[in-house]
Image (cartoon, rainbow, N blue to C red):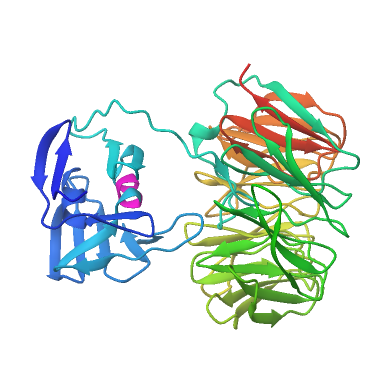
Amino acid sequence: MNRPLLYCDSRLHTNLPVSPVIMDGILYAPAKAVADIFGWTIKDNPSSLNICLNNVEADEIEIYSNQSFYIFNKEKVHWMDQFTLFKPFLMDDHLMIPTEFFLKQLGAINVEFDKNNQRLHFWSLKNNLPQMASKFIINSTYPCYQGSVFRNGKIIDECSPKSLLLKVKWTHEVLDRYTTSPVVFGDLIYIADRTGTMSCLDILSGKVRWKKMFTDRLFSTPFVTEDFLYFGSWDEHFYCLDRFSGNLIWKTNLHGMIQSSPLLFNGQIFIGTLQDKFFCLDLKSGKVQWFFEAEDEIASSPCTDGKSLFFGCRDYHVYALYIETGHLKWKTATKGCTFATPCILEGKLYQGSQDDHLYCICPEEGAIVWKSKTQGGIYGTASLFYDRVIIGSQDGNLYAFHKDTGKELWTYQDIHAIYANPLISGKRIYIGTTGGKFYVINAGSGKLIHAYDLKDGINTSAAIASETVMIASGNVLYAFGNP
């Protein structure tokens, strides 16, 4: 990384004007040099604080110094991963950008940053540029409820099993039914059951690495990071554990039962309670930074677009708070309880309600863009697949609506209620019903690929990592994979 050179296909492509730098584990490189690999040119550069790029297809990207977003074809896109926002900055009058994220926007595939050797490898499908022989290994991570801070349930296709027909790799049985969805980091799975026990399992074998019992029930699906596990309990405490041992790091009394799943973002934790309050906690200490008081219980888990926090409430409203202060930005009324967790994608917020409707809401103003009718209440969270929003309902139907208009595109019907969220990877939907059916469905057409009869009702959602699908049915956790 100390040599300011850029190689393509083992040949020197260009001398970089400044050396790339690594900050907080993120590689930054000069924006113009990275864009040049793909044939993008500077359209306008009025100052070093921002640049505007064009390609031969007339696409346009505007990048700004010290801003957490860029503009791609007039659409705002955030520089972010599952946990943190990043900002380009100036170095010797050159605009330095988070390189891995930018490469993916430009069409690179198999982007891999080797931190040990301080080298970034990727493949380009344009201009016959670099054909790297090194294998890209997908990070085995499904860290939180619905997979990311956006809660949109879309997981990269490489994580999904390759085979359409799945095989049970292992099962793990506990004394009482599972009450959270599984989350994954590396080779470890974390999941809780009705006895108040949090378990850590090996993803390859299902064997217990550790388990820890708490004084009350756990319904809060954890958020797992590289070192720690975060979740709430009905005992009114929020916990941080060492994820490798289960040892307690800290706990905070929030004076209200916690059913919501936490959101971690920019060094802070966001969580709601059944005693009407929404909290911001410090990630390292658990100290309360601020709280907001809603009008009723908050069972919904928050999502974020990087600027605001969004969650549903028993008082029939969807709330938006400013992420830095916790002050109310807006609240929008539905005609039923909004127990469901909202999700966000491409500048739209999607929220299910017990009034038998899925709502599309403008996240800036709270205005309802459209609402679409189902035949039953919605407990689950929507997931996004290209132009469609997919959601289950208590009426037993799985619906696909057009994300821009709300038009119904297809339905798949079961006779049992659907409380779980649809998980999407490899163009397939993985979802369970309260009747114990586990379905694999084509996300484009809504056609059934395969159905599996499991032991008991499925009330929580699946998780995917390392080509393994994990789903709980009653008191049994199943791991499905390639035959």
Q: Residue at x 63, y 50 (%)?
A: 146
Q: Is residue 14 magenta?
A: no
Instruction: Provide the residue span drawn in magenta.
Output: 101-105
Residue 361 in the image: state x and y as whole percent. Answer: 58, 65
Viewer-proximal residue among 483 and 432: 483
- Check the image and report above or below for 361 versus 396: below
> For this view, does 47 lie left or right of residue 28?
left
Which picture quadrant has residue 116? top left
The rendered magenta stretch, by its main secondary structure, is classed as helix
Viewer-proximal residue among 332 and 39: 39
Residue 278 in the image: state x and y as whole percent. Answer: 70, 74
Q: Residue at x 34, y 66 (%)?
A: 87
Residue 210 in the image: state x and y as whole percent. Answer: 74, 43
Q: From this viewpoint, is residue 239 visible?
A: yes
- Check the image and report above or below for 52 versus 438: below
Q: How many marks?
A: 0
- Check the image and report above or below for 277 versus 353: below
Which picture quadrant has residue 240? bottom right
Question: Which image quadrant: the C terminus?
Answer: top right
Viewer-proximal residue among 114 and 397: 114
Q: Residue at x 14, y 64 (%)?
A: 44
Residue 359 in the image: state x and y as whole percent. Answer: 65, 61
> For this view, does 284 lie left or right of residue 65?
right
Q: Residue at x 71, y 51 (%)?
A: 246
Q: From this viewpoint, is residue 360 visible?
A: no
